[in-house]
Structure formats: structure tokens, C-alpha cells
Image (tube, coloured by chain):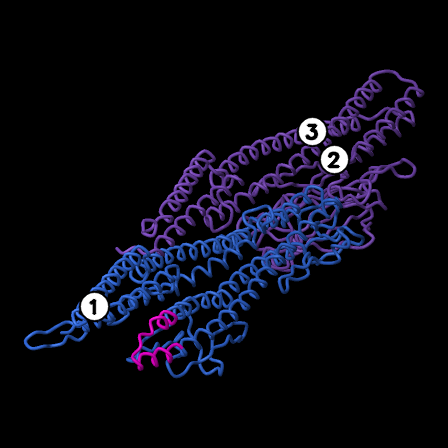
Amino acid sequence: MSISSVFDISQKSLAAYQEALDVTSNNIANASNTDYSRQQVVLTPSQPQQLGNYIFGTGVELGSIQRASDTLTNSQIRTNNQKYSDNNQRSTILNQVQQLFSEPSSTGLSSLSTAFFNSWQQLSVTPNSTALRNNVIQAAQNLSSQIQNINDGLNSVKSDLTSEANGQVTQLNADIKQVQNLNAQIFQAQNSGQQPNDLLDQRDKVLNDLSNIANVNISFDSGNSAQVSIGGVFVADRATYTQLQLSNTNGKISLTTTDGSATASLNGGTLFALTDMYDNTIPSYQSSLDGYVNNLMNSVNAQHSTGYTINNPPQTSVNFFSSYQSGTLTINPAIVQDPNKIAVSSDGTAGNGNIALNIANLINQKNANGTSLLDTYNQLISKIGNDTQSATNSAQSYQLVLKQLQTQKASISGVSTDEEMSNVIQYQKSYDASAKIMSIASQMLDTLIAMVV
Amino acid sequence: MRISDSIFNTDYLNNLNTIKNNVTTLQNQLATGNKIQQPSDSPSGTSELLSWNSQLDQMTTYSSNIDSATSFVTDTTNAMQSIQNEITTDLTQLTSVNSATVSNTDLTNYANKMNQSLQTILDLANSQSDGKYVFGGTDFASVPYSLSPGNSSVGVNTDVSGSQSIRTSQNVLQKINMSGSEVFGTILSQNGNIDPTTAVGATVSSQTSVYDTAGTQYTFKTNYTKTAADTYSMTYDIVDGSGNTVLAQPPAPKSFVFNLANGSLQTVNGQTPAPIQINLPSKNIYFTFDPTGINENTGTSSLSTSANQTTDIFNTLIAVRNNLQAGTKPTAAQIQAITDFNNRLLDNIAKAGNNTNQLSNSKTLLTNQQTQLQSMISNVQGVDVAKSVVDLQNQQNVLQDIYHMAAMVSSNSLLNYL
């Protein structure tokens, strides 16, 4: 061994610790980046030299830069992401929907329906009163207006859902394309002997984003490329990718490939919430509301048409409501123009309010199932409340699981500045010591040269 | 467990968010006084609230209706009491006319007094409450009663037999008016039985006497022709002493349907049975026909019809007035007719009083039910203010602690000591 080998060892050591400090510096820089997986320096001894009967070490070198990551935790996070995003999106939409009904309050349909039937009750006491007849028309208009507001609101929510779903599909397609691109880059880097840690982080982030949007199935091939399918439809691997689109068939939206050859079977993620709310949940609410309004209109008309108006000559077979179409409950325009055409007399005399009494009592009349008119509406509100509560509770529940998994992930992959600063001190001291050795070797060489001179 | 910087940050934000949510919820509850802001706060509670609020609103309407009806019944009672005062005065005067020697001049004076009394009673019979004729039944097309041009008779202009009812609760309907036919009119009540084995096409008949305002006798005939099981077509006719009809045209047949189970009259022309007002101004014949007492039960078919009076009070008073003007004292039959009317009027005043009491009782019941319902609503919806204030204070303290902890912990790392 010569003095020059001391220089070699020190030089390698200085280089190794400088690289270690680079990695630590990179970790610290990404301490706030939640998608970043911390990197660990693995230092290994250099190839030793044998001189005679002795083997001498030749210093240290950078063995590898490892990425701290747990595949199982990442996979569990993606699974829970789908469920959380689905329920959270539903909770958000349902909260908007329940606000549309304004219950429980005096502006809700329940109060306005009661006010409508109460106006008939009041009219039954003084059936010839024009003021009370106008009161009935006013109550009916208030009722009709709120029904229109709710229906408009539900249609508006559906329209927003379509826009939102289209936005999600655009994001989905961008992510799919990026996965294929990252797969190719990762494969290339690995083939050239590089450690593509940052590319792997980027791909994990994109896969997480995909799991927020839809139910993704991800597997990794021997070349560590992610093979991704959404709802049973293949969308990306290292070589190819498939773009998706929203298709609207018979008023229902679905996720299909752009060529229409395959339809994804969604069961998770925000896109599932958006399409399911659009296709099933909101239409079921609209159907229930329509059922209530139709029932109300038909019941009132059935009674009203048997009564007599108090104009001259008295008329019968007059409907109070003209129609209920496209969410609009229309009051008979002839009645709006002439309140005397409200037919509450059972015998044609102006003081007879028997029909008004019958109409007023419709609110409490029970059908064959023992359910009153208002009960059917209350059941709808209760269902919306339950659906909202259930989605919110499920979202909170999945969020808790997700937080635990993210904590678990952060525990493995997250950067600790304390830890990194400790490493900095360690590497700095080692660097200082290596430099000192080099200085000492220099002095030794100086001594030898002085002896010669 | 290895603690990274992001765990600190995430946990801190999560806890902060949870506490802020709690604070917001409590603040909303305290600001509105309501625990249930939207259906998802308590779906079952919301359903109960909607149902109870609807019931409460209905009760408020029933209560308001009772107030209007009470006013109407009071006006009716006052009118009947005023009529009763007039009739009592008339009876006193007529008794004194009959028990003393009076001159023709005195009789004329009494006749004038009778005429004035008649006018007063007629005005009271036409009195109104809230735009409705008190004794007009349900037909407000014109004044119910009016004198003929020569003041020789009082005719009925409208159907004064109608019944006005209000709902005082979900299942209770209460009649509030005393119809003109009940108070003043001649009511022909038909009772008896129709044999259900009567063949389809066969007719069951009945007849009785009716009188015009001058006391001329006519015959009122009713025929029930079976058209199907439990269903009969009813027609009527009024004929004079010579057997000739006095109706301008035959009335439209009415369909009578009897209840199969108990044999009572179920519907008339598809509606709940009610007395039928028959006005024949051309012959001065006015009466109410009440067929609600007939049944269809196994046994012989037999119908009977009876009248509560021969002539109504107005035309009785006119006859008395005419007699007095002609120098004739009132007959015992006339005084008896007025006395009978007075007795029926006292009964009707008592019925009206009973109506007032029932309305008052219904109002009290409603008030109690409203109080109870409001208490139930308050239990479901109302916020326990004391508890919420304590909870809010507690959550705000926790929030402050989190801020302090975050400030203390986040500011320090190994960097501070290098």
C-alpha cells in the first residue's frame, strides 16, 4: 500500500458523502411533498485489494439510492380512495339536493301543501267569499311555484352532474395517457441501470388520482409496468392506452371506450357517484315527487269536478288543475281568471262548501296501504335525508381508514427533517474526517519529499 | 412508529377540521334554536316534524274556522231570540184581543201592530252574517223570504233547506246553521219502510196534504219505482182538489239508493241524503220534503208522511192581520199555530246554544292538542341551549389548545439547535 492509496480512499469517501448529502438535500427539499417517497443512501465498501497475505479495504462508495415505499399500503390506499371518493361525492350532491326541498321549513312543500289544503278548509266556512277563493288560488300558485323550483333545481343538478362527469373523464384520459408514458420511461430507465425513483413517485400519484375517479384495477408486470383497467376495460400498459368517453343512451350516461366497443362497469370513485346519481338516484326522487304531485292533482280534480261553480249559470265537471307536465303544475286558467269558477258547491248553491270540505280532507285521507297523501312526500324527504346521512357517514368512515393508511404510508415514505438533519451531521462529519485524512496524507508526502530534498 | 413531518401536518389539520366542524354545527344550532337544520340531521325526526307541523297548521285552521263559525252561530241565536221576543209580544197582544171587548178601531190598531211585527220578523229572517243569509240555508242567490206585491203572502225565494258544516278536527264535521226550513218552514217528514223484495218496475206510493199560503189544500204524492236491487227512482207530484197537477212540468226523477247492510237511505242522486226544498211560487206552495226517515227492510211496504205545520209563521201572521183588519178576532187554531211556532223556536234556540257550546268545547280541545303538539315538536327540534353553550365553550377551548400545540411543536426541529 502506498500513500497515494490514502488519497484514493479519501477521494472516494469525499465523493460518496457528497452524494449522500445530495440525496439528503433532495429529501429535505421534498419534505412537504406528500407524493414524494423519501430516498435512502446505501453506502457500500469499495472492492478490496489483496497484497501478499493481507486484504486491504479501498474505501466507500455509493451502492444505491433506495426509495422507501410500501406497495401493499399504496394498493390499500387506492382501494379506499375509490370508496371514499364515491361516498364523498354522493354526500356533496345529496346535500345540494336536500337543500332544494327546503325542509323542514315554512317554504317547504310540506308546509305549502298543508297551506293549500287549509285554504280549502277556510273556504268551506264561507264558500261564497271571493277573498277566500283568491286565497285558494294563491295557495295553489305557491305550491305550484315550489314544485317548479324543486324540479328546476333537480334538473340543474343533473345538468351539473353531466358537466362534472365530462370534466372527470377528461382528467381520466389525461391520467391514462400519463400512466402509459411513465411506464415507458420507467422501463427505459431501469433497462439502462438507473433507479427511476421520482418517476415511480409520479406514477403512484397518477394511479392514486385514477382511483379517486373510478374503480381501477392495477397489476404490475415483470418489467414493473402498471397494467391498468377501469371497470373491467383495459386502459393502459407500457405499450398502449385506451381513451374513454361518456355516452348518453336513453337518458342514462355510461363510460365507454371512444370507439364504443366496451362499456366500463363502474362501482367506485367520483365518476361512479356522478353517473349513478344521474342515472338512478335523482330520477327516483323525481319519480317520487311526480307521484306525489300527480296524486295530489288527481285527487283534487276528482273532487273538484263533481262540484258546481258559483258563476251564472253554475258549471260542473271543472278541473282545478289543468295539467302536471315537465315539472309544472298548472292551475286551470279559467279559475285563475274567475275565482267564482272554483267548484266547491255540491248542489249549485253559493253557500254550499261540501266539496271544499272533501278537498280539505284529502290531506289526511289514507290509501289502501294506510298512507296519507302527505305521508308519501314525508317518506321521500326521509329517504333523501337517510341517503345523505348514509353517504356522509360512509365518507367519514372511509376517510378515517384512508387517514390511517396515509399515516402508515407517511411513516414509511414521508420525510422527517430531524432524521435528515441527523444524516446531514453524520455525512458532514464523515466528509470532514475524510478531508482530514487527505490533509494528513499530504503532510506525510511533504515529510517524505523534504527528506529527499 | 416513525413520525414524518407530513404526519404532524396532516394530523394537525384533521383535528383542526373536526373541531371546526363541531364548532360550526353548535353555532348554527344556537343561532337558529333548531337541532334539525336539514333532513340528513335526523331523517326520522324530520319526518315526524313535517307530519306534526302539518297537523299543527291544520289545527290552527280548525281553530280559525271555529272562531268564524262561533260568530255565525251567535248571529243566528241573536236573530232567533229577537224573533222569539216579537212572537211573545204578538201572543200577549192576541191573548188580550181575545179576552177583552175591543172595538173595530182597536182591532185595526192590533192589525197594524201585527203587520209591523211581521215586517220585523221578515227582516230578521233575512238577516246576514259575514255576507251569508243566516236562515238562507246554502243558497245565497237572493233574499230568502219576501212579501208578495200586495202584501198578501210571504214566499220563499231560494232553497232555504241547505246545511252548512265546518270541520273542527280531522274526523269531526259540525253543522253550524239553522236552515230557514228548520226555523220557519213546513217540513213534510216521510217515514216508513219499502220491502226489498219489491219487484223491479213495481212502485211504492204515498200521499199527504199540503197547503198554499192562503190555506188551500193540495195533495203531495210520492212514488218509488224500483230500478235495481236497493235502488229506486223517486218522482213526486202536487195535485189540486180536482186531481189535476199544478206542476208546470214533472220534476226530474231522483235516484234513491239504500244501504244493503242496514237498510238506511244511503244516497240521493249519488250524494248524502238531505231534505228537498220544494218551492212553487205560482201556487204559493212552499215546503221541505224530508225523505231521510225511510228504510228498506224486510216487511210490508208502508210509507207515511206528516207535516210539522199547515202554514208557516209568516202567512199565519198575515192571516191573523187580515182577520183583524176585517174586524175578526184571531181563531184559537191561529193562536195555537203561533204558540207551536214559538215552542219550536225555543227548541231551535236551544239547539243553536248547543252548537255554540260544542264549538267552544272543540276550541278548548284544539288548544290543548296544539300545546301538546308544540311540546312534542320542541322536544324533537328544539336545542338544549345550556348544553349547547357548554359544548361550544368546550370545543372552543379544544380549538385554542390545538392552535397552541401546533405553534409550539411545529416551530421546533433539530434545525433550531444546530
Is there CB contact under 8 Å for labels 3 and 2?
A: no
**Label 2 packing within 10 angstroms: few (<14), some (14-19), many (20+):** some
Q: What number is the disc on residue A446?
A: 1
Amino acid under disc 2: Gln
Farthest-out residue, top: B100
Q: Is residue A262 visible?
A: yes
- From the viewer's side, name the closer residue of A307 and B95: A307
Q: Quadrant of the N terminus of chain A?
A: bottom left
Chain B tint as drawn: purple
Amino acid under disc 3: Ile
**Chain coloured blue in this rendering:** A
Chain at tag 3: B
Which of the 4 quarters of the picture holds residue A391?
bottom left
Residue placed under numbered mark 3 in the picture: B349
Chain at tag 2: B
The Cα–Cα distance between marks 1 and 2, rounded to whole angstroms, is 153 Å
Q: What number is the disc on residue A33?
A: none
The span shown in magenta is A182-203
Q: Quadrant of the C terminus of chain A?
A: bottom left
Q: What number is the disc on residue B309?
A: 2
The x and y percentages for residue B17 are 43, 50
Is there CB contact under 8 Å for labels 3 and 1?
A: no
- From the viewer's side, name the closer residue of B224 and A418: A418
The Cα–Cα distance between marks 3 and 2, rounded to whole angstroms, is 19 Å
Amino acid under disc 1: Asp
Mark whose residue sits in front, 3 or 2: 3
Residue B21 highlighted magenta (yes or no): no
Mark positioned earlier in the residue sequence (3 or 2): 2
